[in-house]
Image: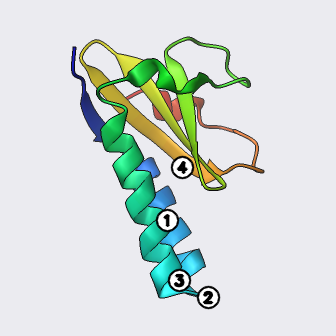
């Protein structure tokens, strides 16, 4: 079964912030990182369980993939995957529970 991937507004803002931060040093690397994150989000629609369960949450339907040093956090529901956050791997997942409510 193939899922439809959508992004929460907060996840889009996360990605934009990452791009702006990296762009200060390298426009090329910023484009590369953003492209890889978007590509990874497209690939999870075929194999959503490929990501690991987010340890801080422990819910089988909330998973993550690491792209470079960033965590792509998503929720799997019936026929849909919602990307809820893209954060640096060293950051803790704080106050993102509200992002799971769409």
Q: What's the distance in space between the residues labelled 3 and 2, CA to CA? A: 5 Å
Give the residue drawn at x 48%, y 24%.
Answer: 50
Q: What's the distance in space between the residues labelled 4 and 2, CA to CA? A: 20 Å
Label 4 near label 3: C-beta < 8 Å? no
Q: Position of residue 17 (x, y in %)?
A: 52, 68
Mark closest to the chain's N terminus, 1 or 4 = 1
Q: What's the distance in space between the residues labelled 3 and 4, CA to CA? A: 17 Å
Q: What's the distance in space between the residues labelled 1 and 4, CA to CA? A: 12 Å
Mark closest to the chain's N terminus, 4 or 2 = 2
The C terminus lies in which quarter of the figure?
Answer: top left
Would you name the residue on which mark 3 appears? 23
Q: Residues within 10 Å of mark 3 (few under 14, many from 20)?
A: some
Would you name the residue on which mark 4 appears? 86
Q: What's the distance in space between the residues labelled 3 and 1, CA to CA? A: 10 Å
> Is residue 31 rendered to the left or right of residue 51?
left
Image quarter for residue 94? top right
Mark closest to the chain's N terminus, 3 or 1 = 3
Task: Please name which of the two marks, 4 or 2, marks the residue nearer to the observer.
Answer: 2
Q: Residues within 10 Å of mark 1 (few under 14, many from 20)?
A: some
Q: In the displayed structure, would residue 78 be above or below residue 75? A: above
> Is residue 11 rendered to the left or right of residue 21?
left
């Amino acid at each position: 079964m193939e899922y439809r991937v959508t992004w929460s507004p907060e996840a889009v803002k996360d990605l934009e912030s990452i791009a702006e931060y990296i762009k200060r040093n390298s426009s090329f690397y910023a484009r590369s990182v953003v492209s890889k994150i978007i590509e990874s989000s497209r690939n999870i629609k075929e194999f959503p369980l490929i990501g690991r369960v987010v340890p801080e949450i422990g819910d089988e339907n909330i998973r993550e993939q690491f792209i470079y040093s960033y965590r792509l956090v998503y929720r799997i529901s019936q026929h849909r995957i919602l990307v809820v956050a893209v954060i640096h791997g060293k950051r803790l997942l704080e106050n993102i529970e509200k992002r799971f409510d769409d």
